[in-house]
Image: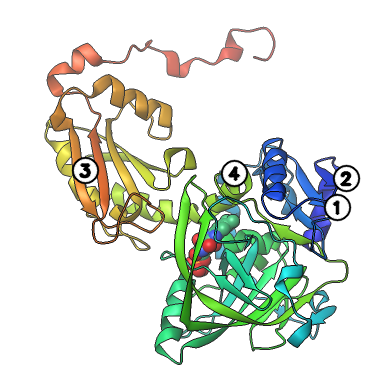
Amino acid sequence: MQDMRSFVTSLEQRGELVRIRRPVDSRFELAAVMTRLEAAGKAFVFEQVRGARYPLVGGLFSRVERFGAALGRGPDGFTHKDMEAALEQAKAQPIAPVEVATGACHEVIHTGDSLDLRHLPVPWFFERDSGPFITAGVGFARHPHSGVINVGFYRTLILGRDSCAINASSLSDLRRIYGHAAAHGGEMPIALAIGVEPALLFAAASKLPPTISEIDIAGGLKGAPIEVTRALTSDLLVPANAEFVVEGTVDLSRRCTNVLGEYAGQYGPESAPVTRVTAITHRREPLFCSILAGRNPEHNTLGKIATYGIKRDLAARLLQIDPCVRRVNIFSDPRLGPMVHVAIAIAKQADGQPAELIRRVFSTPGNIFPVSRIARRVIIVDEDVDVDSIEDVEWAIWSRLATPEQMVLIPGVESWELDRVSRPGEGSLRVGIDATMRIRDRDALARPCTPGFESIRLEDYLDGPA
Ligand SMILES: Cc1cc2nc3c(=O)[nH]c(=O)nc-3n(C[C@H](O)[C@H](O)[C@H](O)COP(=O)(O)O)c2cc1C
């Protein structure tokens, strides 16, 4: 897919996109209608947002099947596993971008007095948000040491005509780039591209080591280089076919609070440095893109991409933590709150073993983050439980938990900022559950099983296909 607008056209041709012609208000009304449309699985274009000069498009990636369609691999049966595999392949075969002299993103240029962020159709999503937020903005900033351009999604609060606050969570590389700039001069250039081609969108959502540029991974995903062009007011490179590019200078000495309803269904109050906008450029007849904030399908479908690498890293470490460990799975699901839940199947030899293992798991470092920073719960199960199924893991808890000693509570653990029950200096609770059978109960609690079941093939018993 060459650019975002081609994907919009393809969705419209398949009848998956609806157009809203009636004027809507950017404060709450837009978000309320977006919520209904996303729940119905529809992508959408709002043609008239009151006070704004451009239409708003959204709901494009509320279903993972559309990732496949956008990458030319067909929507049918495309899953997060396929997306993870596609990203791994792109990492193995990255393709560097090509720089072009000029791009469609520069067809219309606003600088000085002619630039005004308030002309964009930026939704105000939730009652207690700090203001309207750009949510599909893909930020471009240069790593100070490697020179690599780092790309990620960073929600951006509109503060006024020419100022905004670009949020970098404590888990992001951008936070570290901000930190370096704060210590060296206090300012840095940044660019926010809105309405980028799908491959770049997926690469921006993924969590990569700081030495790898997401632009190269986007090229690998697309199977062709991403076209970039020089920003107008800095030496950054920006995607040539983006619908909009907002360029600016981050002033690390000025901060503001930016509260937004977050992906796991609670407000995320954070603080971000203020960015002075130096240029807004866009294509002719541009489409402003937005991702419905909060615990909603598109945010979480795209957000899941960021968890692939984190989960793999943690699972690989935990598999090595003790010879009794057989299988590990990390659940990251906004239905289970903002943190991850770790399920580990073990071959248990003694009743005290799981509780001891739980404590070791919570003190395990990771390559990207320590386990305790993002894991709320560790559940140890027997080998007969399917750790990939949350239902089976929950079944094990509520069938095999017998004594208080099987619960491990660890208070005061430092969390990341979206664990909102965690207060600065106090941390929050970690929960370990030994959901294994006590050895003396094994006979009583055995799961009913039918000998020979595994080898049965239904087609051997039917005249036609099953
Ligand atoms: C819709 C959406 C919004 C996001 N908003 C933010 C954000 O405001 N701040 C942030 O640091 N990460 C946010 N993320 C996650 C990052 O984009 C993602 O973790 C990325 O890998 C961070 O890149 P970095 O570590 O290279 O800076 C968001 C992800 C999605 C899909």
The answer to which of marks 4 and 3 sits earlier in the sequence is 4
Quick one: quadrant of the C terminus?
A: top right
Q: Is any part of residue 226 visible from this angle?
A: no
Q: Give residue 9's mark.
A: 1
Q: What secondary structure is marked by label 1?
A: helix
**Structural distance between the alpha carbons of marks 4 and 3:** 32 Å
Residue linked to disc 2: 13
Check contact, mark 1 vs mark 3: CB within 8 A. Answer: no
Res 270 quadrant in image: bottom left
Q: Nearer the viewer, residue 260 or 43?
A: 260
Mark 1 belongs to which amino acid? Thr
Check disc 4: other Cα within 10 Å, few if <14, some if 14-19, many if 20+.
many
Check disc 2: other Cα within 10 Å, few if <14, some if 14-19, many if 20+.
few
Position of 153 compared to 327: left or right?
right
Q: Position of residue 291 (x, y in %)?
A: 65, 54
Q: Give residue 358's mark.
A: 3
Residue drawn at the location 30% of the way across and 47% of the way down:
319
**Structural distance between the alpha carbons of marks 4 and 1:** 23 Å
Residue drawn at the location 75% of the way across and 66% of the way down:
120
The answer to which of marks 2 and 4 sits earlier in the sequence is 2
Q: Nearer the viewer, mark 4 or mark 3?
A: 4
**Structural distance between the alpha carbons of marks 2 and 3:** 52 Å
**Structural distance between the alpha carbons of marks 1 and 2:** 6 Å
Check disc 3: other Cα within 10 Å, few if <14, some if 14-19, many if 20+.
many
The answer to which of marks 1 and 3 sits earlier in the sequence is 1
Check contact, mark 4 vs mark 1: CB within 8 A. Answer: no
Position of 398 compared to 204: left or right?
left
Residue linked to disc 4: 296
